[in-house]
Image: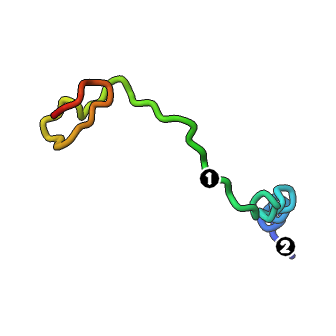
Amino acid sequence: MISQATQSLQLLLLLTGGGCTARAQAKPIPPRIDSVVLAPVQPHEGDSAVLWYDNFDGPEAT
């Protein structure tokens, strides 16, 4: 005799496709980054412990 929990699990697997849908088997598509924008406040800009900071909005440092 099959327990109520086993029957519930079998029904759930049947209704959800059992995890064997074509979508689950397809190769995942990696996320695509359209653009990158810096935050207006850069915490490391004023940190004395930072060895190198490149300010793309300011004058060139020599």
The quadrant in which the N terminus is found is: bottom right
Residue 5 position (above or below residue 44): below
Q: Residue at x 23, y 37 (%)?
A: 53
Q: Which mark is residue 30?
A: 1
Tell me the quarter of the picture where residue 33 sits: top right
Type of amino acid under label 1: Pro
- x then y, percent, for residue 32: 60, 45
- x then y, percent, for residue 52: 20, 42
Density class for disc 2 (Cα within 10 Å; few <14, some 14-19, many ≥20) is: few
- Observer-nearest residue: 1 or 15? 15
Residue 27 position (above or below residue 34): below
Q: Earlier in the sequence, mark 1 or mark 2?
A: 2
Q: What kind of element bears circle 2?
A: loop
The residue tagged 2 is 2
Type of amino acid under label 2: Ile
Density class for disc 1 (Cα within 10 Å; few <14, some 14-19, many ≥20) is: few
Q: In the visual, does 61 lie left or right of 55?
A: left
